[in-house]
Image (cartoon, grey):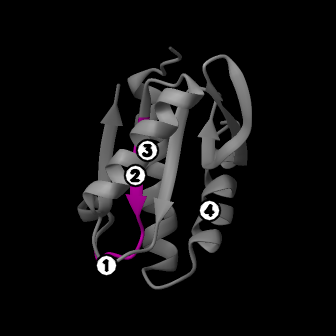
Amino acid sequence: MLDCADELATSVLDAAFDVHRELGPGLLESVYEAALVFALTDRGLSARRQVDINATYRGHDLGVAFRADLVVNSCLLLELKVVEQLQPIHIAQIMTYLKLSNIRRGYLLNFNVKLLKEGIKRVSL
């Protein structure tokens, strides 16, 4: 499994805080995704949007199972939300994404909160 350094995760969260501080809550998920890519790139990080992840069943390729919102430096998965409150299904969703992508750590980031620290959930396998 791919994992990232704690310093990378800290840089990513700092970028998310900057985006939320400037834009605030209430926008579309795609707006936060685009802004976060700029904030991450400004920090010298590699961020890919809407990354295709395939699924397999009994050795058979099932094709694209989902698209990760963001993958940073090929080792950290970010799932962005703009919801009233993170739900258990969101955690199950990112855990499945991590398993299929062979990435150990990810973050659920809910931008629809007054303070972003209330909308961050770290998920690890």
Q: Amino acid at mark 3?
A: Ile
Residue 101, given in percent of the width and then of the height, sits at 58, 29
| Residue 94, label in figure | 3
Disc number lying in front (4 or 1): 1
The answer to whether 87 is drawn above or below residue 31 in the figure is: above
Q: Is residue 29 magenta?
A: no
Q: Which residue is mark 4?
A: 33
Disc number lying in front (1 or 3): 3
Q: Quadrant of the C terminus?
A: top left
Q: Residues within 10 Å of mark 1 (few under 14, many from 20)?
A: few
Q: Earlier in the sequence, mark 4 or mark 1?
A: 4
- Tell me how far mark 4 sits from mark 2, CA to CA: 12 Å
Q: Residues within 10 Å of mark 3 (few under 14, many from 20)?
A: many
The answer to whether 99 is drawn above or below residue 47 in the figure is: above
Q: Earlier in the sequence, mark 3 or mark 2?
A: 3
Q: Earlier in the sequence, mark 4 or mark 2?
A: 4
Q: Which residue is mark 2?
A: 108
Q: Earlier in the sequence, mark 1 or mark 3?
A: 1
Residue that appears at 33% across and 65% down: 116
Q: Which residue is mark 1?
A: 84
Is 40 positioned to the left or the right of 3 in the image? right
Q: Is residue 108 magenta?
A: yes
Which range of residues does the magenta coloring cover?
A: 106-114
The answer to whether 71 is drawn above or below residue 119 in the figure is: above
